[in-house]
Amino acid sequence: MSARSQAWFPVCNPGGDAAPGRFAAPLSRRELMGLSLASVLGVSFSGWLPRLAAAAGADAAKRGKSCILLWMDGGPSQTDTFDLKPGHANGGPFKEIATAAPGVRISEHLPGLARQMNDLAIIRSLSTKEGEHGLATRLMLTGYAPQQAAVRYPCLGSLLSKELGSEESDLPNFVSLSPFRMADAGFLGPNYSPLSVSGASDDPNTRANLALEDLAPPRDRGEKTQRNQFDILRFMAREFEGGDDSEAAKAHRASYAKAMRMVETQARKAFELNEEKPELRDAYGRNRFGQGCLLARRLVERGVAFVEVTLSGAPGNVAGWDTHANNFDQVKALSQVLDPAWSTLMEDLRNRGLLDSTLVVWMGEFGRTPKINPNAGRDHFPLAWSVVLGGAKVKGGQAIGKTSDDAMQVADRPVQVADLYATICTALGIDYHKENISPEGRPIPMVDRGGEPIKELMG
């Protein structure tokens, strides 16, 4: 597996009492810079706080649509999930089962998704060129080949949250429920980076509460004291900025305003999964991925534009989807985590009237070799593999494209990454021809040139 960076989440630091009027004289800029605003606030937002400048999702009805990315770290085997080849030597032992969509068949270990297939569309003919984890991840999460020019391309979450987000919400536009990140906001800058939640909990296999407990002030800090501390923070920020209207100053103001709103509102209790019925939490699965999918529903319900949930392991699985050995036991274990979480998410979104406004994307960095290696595993394979889309009025109940009988190549309707990105943008009501301007003044299209929406999926 490729090297991964650790994603940090908010931690609470002790802070002293403070109240307005305690400074006998105005502070200089140097003195203001020397003070710890975080200690005055009582909460430290680690690496995330400076990146909240323009974050926030407006209410779903006001903003329109949201996207949930289900990221399968390591590269999922299409031949053992959504494009089985029964009867062929490359097919493996898994059986395929019928789904709610006539003629569409998938793995026997995804029975919940089989029932949801009328709202899901499988793209079986994606073809890419990157077979190394890091390069392939950046390709799939940005839509651009990483070796193209010296450009730091923004990731999908940053691109979409910039288009769909609003500055009026108490929550960030982009939340990542992933223990690591391999793509960021790129040239869009820190204003469009995610709030990263590691998924830490006392017992991740059973509770997996994913709570941001550090939004709460210390127990000995009352509401009045907290208000006073916020007043001091605002005073210090005004003095520090001194009328500066630069982009950096604006980002600084927005960052702290967003952080204070999250503390003051407790992020509208979005992260308090214990508000949900135990039966629903059980249905999603009492694990980080399952509870992450439930949290994703709570976040889009509150207007968050983009949520990323990663499945990188399962009980008895130490390699995630990077199944070079013992592929079939590993994929079965992962499927038993994936299926209840994803199928319950689809049903939950539908029941709450959110499915038409929420696009769900399932993908990894590449597929796995159809040929089974001597270790009963499958290796990296970017030439012909599958992704799945659902919701946001995507025409479900179908499989787009086809691979050959041995699954080694695309036999019909090849799809490129740019086509996938154009399809995602179109489903969310975004003009995929739009360009963002890099710091050097260079126009960068949201979708790499040549990409076109998959017309069969568009309503």
Image (tube, rainbow, N blue to C red):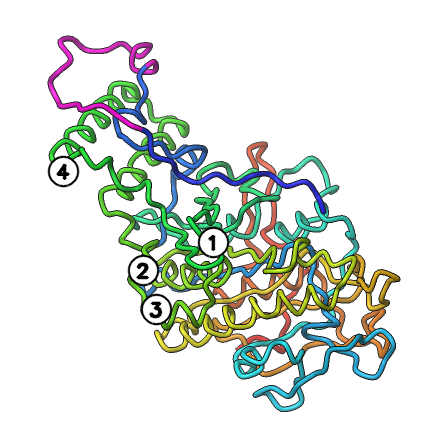
Q: Nearer the viewer, residue 24 or 337?
A: 337
Q: Residue under circle 3? A: 278
Say which amino acid is labelled 1.
Pro
Q: Residue under circle 4? A: 223
Say which amino acid is labelled 4.
Glu
Q: Residue under circle 1? A: 204
Question: Quick one: label 2 or label 1, which is nearer the N terminus?
Answer: 1
Look at 75% across and 72% down and name the residue there: 79
Q: Secondary structure at mark 3?
A: helix
Question: Quick one: label 4 or label 2, which is nearer the N terminus?
Answer: 4
Q: Secondary structure at mark 1?
A: loop
Mark 4–mark 1 Cα distance, whole angstroms, equals 32 Å
Q: How many marks?
A: 4
- Asked if residue 199 lies in the magenta stretch, the reply is no
Q: Position of residue 419 (x, y in %)?
A: 66, 63
Image-based side of 48 in relation to 97, left or right: left
Frontmost of labels 3 and 4 is: 3
Image marks 4 and 2: residues in contact by CB distance under 8 Å: no
Image-based side of 118 in relation to 171, left or right: right
Frontmost of labels 4 and 2 is: 2
Say which amino acid is labelled 3.
Pro
Look at 42% across and 33% down and name the residue there: 46
Point out the stretch of residues depicted in magenta: 14-34
Q: Residue under circle 2? A: 274
Mark 2–mark 1 Cα distance, whole angstroms, equals 14 Å
- Asked if residue 29 lies in the magenta stretch, the reply is yes
Tell me the quarter of the picture where residue 24 sits: top left
The crowd level at tag 1 (other Cα within 10 Å; few <14, some 14-19, many 20+) is some
Q: Position of residue 199 (x, y in %)?
A: 47, 49
* Magenta highlight: main SS: loop
